[in-house]
Image (spheres, rainbow, N blue to C red):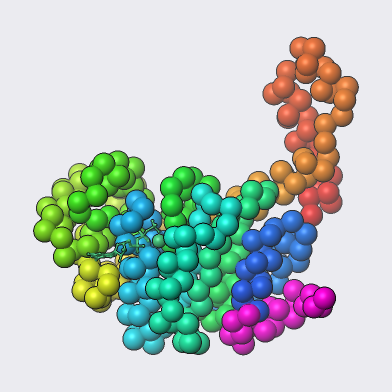
C-alpha cells in the first residue's frame, strides 16, 4: 500500500509544477468529504491569479477541439495553461472525455500545460465545490490561464458562468434545434460568442443571427458588446482573433465591470457554504420527536427546517 502523501506535501510539490501532485490534489478536492477544509486552507495561498475562461455550448459544437486550439495559441504566446473538463452528467470519465484526451495528446509532454477531467460523483456539494478548488490547484502550479469546458447536458450543477472571468458560448451551424434552444438560454451569460465549424456554409448566417440577438439583448453590465468570432478549431482558423477578443474582454473588465474579480469568489463561497450546511445537517440528523411532530402536523416542515438551521448556526464549531 502506497503511503498517502499529506496534503501539505502535495501542495508543495504542485507549486513546483509537479503534474502528479496536481492530479492528486484535484482528486482530493473532487472527493470532498474529509480533508476538504485542510486542502482548501492550503490552497488559499496561491502565487498568482489565473484568468479563467469558461467554454459552454451544446454537445458536439467543438468545445473540446476549441479548447485544444486555444491552448496551442496561448502556448505560442508564452502563457501556461490549465484545462479542466467538467462533466456534471456522468459519474465516470467516459467516452467524450476519452476522445478529448486523445486530442490533448499533443500537449501531453508540454510542462506548461495541465489537463484534468472531473466527473460528478454525487458527493455533497459535488462539482460546484470541486471546480473552483481545482482552479486554485492549477493556479498553484503556475497556470496563467485556466480553460474550463463543461461537457454534456444538465449543466445546472456547475456555475461556470460565475467561475469564469470570460464566458465563451460556443455554437456551430447546421446543428438544428440544439443550437436554436441554446441561443435563447445562453445569451445572457456570454461575454463572447464563437461560431465554430466556420468551414460550414451556414456559419456566416449564424453569425449574423447572433450579432442581431446580441445587439438586442439587454446587458446588466452595459458597455461590453460581446463579439461574435468565427473559428475552425481543427486548423486554428480564427483562434488568434478569438484569443485577442478574450484579452480585450479582460482589459475591459478590469476597467469597467462592477464586482470584477468577486464573481468567482461568490461561486466558490456559496458552493462551500452549501456543502458545509449539507454535511452538517447530514451529521446532525433530525430527532424523532421533531419528525413525529411534522408527520402529525403539529409542526410545519418549514419551521422544523428553520429550527435545524438555527441550531446549526448556534454551534459554529460543528461547521468545520
Ligand atoms: N468541420 C469541422 N468539424 C469540427 C470543427 N470543430 C470540431 N469539429 C468536429 O466536431 C466533432 C465534435 O467536436 P468536439 O470538440 O468533441 O465537440 P464538443 O463540443 O467538445 O462535444 P461534447 O464535449 O461532446 O459536447 C469532432 O468530430 C470534431 O472533429 C470545425 O471547426 N469544423
Ligand atoms: Mg467536449
Q: Is residue 11 magenta?
A: yes
Q: Residue at x 59, y 81 (%)?
A: 19
Above/below status of 20 relative to 314: below
* Residue 179 location (% of width, % of height): 27, 47
The percent position of residue 112, horizontal first and vertical second, equals 47, 85
Is residue 31 visible to us here? yes
Count the marks. Answer: 0
Residue 20 image-quadrant placement? bottom right
Q: Tell me which image quadrant ligand 2 sits in.
A: bottom left
Q: Image check: 205 left or right of 74?
A: left
Is residue 222 shown left or right of residue 316? Answer: left
Name the residue located 68 percent from the left edge and 60 percent from the top edge.
31
In the image, farthest residue toward the top: 297
Q: Does 63 sit above or below residue 234? A: above
Q: Quadrant of the N terminus?
A: bottom right
Magenta segment? 1-20
- Where residue 141 appears, as percent x and y from the top left, is 57, 80
User: Could you tell me residue 153's position as x and y percent?
Assistant: 43, 47
Amino acid at each position: 500500500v502506497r503511503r498517502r502523501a499529506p496534503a501539505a506535501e502535495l501542495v508543495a510539490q504542485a507549486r513546483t509544477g509537479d503534474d502528479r501532485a496536481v492530479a492528486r490534489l484535484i482528486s482530493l478536492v473532487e472527493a470532498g468529504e474529509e480533508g476538504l477544509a485542510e486542502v482548501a486552507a492550503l490552497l488559499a495561498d496561491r502565487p498568482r491569479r489565473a484568468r479563467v475562461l469558461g467554454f459552454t455550448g451544446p454537445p458536439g459544437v467543438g468545445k473540446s477541439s476549441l479548447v485544444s486550439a486555444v491552448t496551442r495559441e496561448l502556448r505560442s504566446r508564452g502563457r501556461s495553461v490549465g484545462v479542466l473538463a467538467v462533466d456534471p452528467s456522468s459519474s465516470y470519465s467516459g467516452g467524450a472525455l476519452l476522445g478529448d484526451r486523445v486530442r490533448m495528446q499533443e500537449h501531453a509532454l508540454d510542462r506548461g500545460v495541465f489537463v484534468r477531467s472531473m466527473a460528478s460523483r454525487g458527493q455533497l456539494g459535488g462539482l460546484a465545490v470541486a471546480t473552483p478548488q481545482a482552479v486554485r490547484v492549477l493556479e498553484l502550479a503556475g497556470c496563467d490561464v485556466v480553460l474550463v469546458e463543461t461537457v454534456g447536458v444538465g449543466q445546472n450543477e456547475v456555475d461556470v458562468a460565475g467561475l469564469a472571468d470570460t464566458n465563451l458560448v460556443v455554437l456551430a451551424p447546421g446543428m438544428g434545434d440544439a443550437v436554436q434552444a441554446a441561443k435563447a438560454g445562453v445569451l445572457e451569460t456570454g461575454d463572447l460568442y464563437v461560431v465554430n465549424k466556420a468551414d460550414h456554409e451556414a456559419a456566416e448566417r449564424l453569425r449574423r443571427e447572433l450579432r442581431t440577438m446580441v445587439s438586442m439583448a439587454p446587458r446588466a453590465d452595459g458597455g461590453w458588446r460581446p463579439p461574435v468570432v468565427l473559428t475552425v478549431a481543427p486548423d486554428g482558423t480564427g483562434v488568434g482573433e478569438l484569443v485577442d477578443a478574450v484579452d480585450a474582454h479582460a482589459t475591459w473588465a478590469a476597467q469597467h465591470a462592477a464586482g470584477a474579480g468577486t464573481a468567482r469568489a461568490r461561486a466558490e463561497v456559496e458552493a462551500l457554504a452549501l456543502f458545509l450546511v449539507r454535511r452538517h445537517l447530514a451529521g446532525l440528523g433530525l430527532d424523532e420527536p421533531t419528525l413525529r411532530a411534522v408527520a402529525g402536523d403539529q409542526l410545519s416542515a418549514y419551521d422544523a427546517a428553520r429550527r435545524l438551521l438555527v441550531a446549526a448556526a448556534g454551534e459554529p464549531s460543528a461547521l468545520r
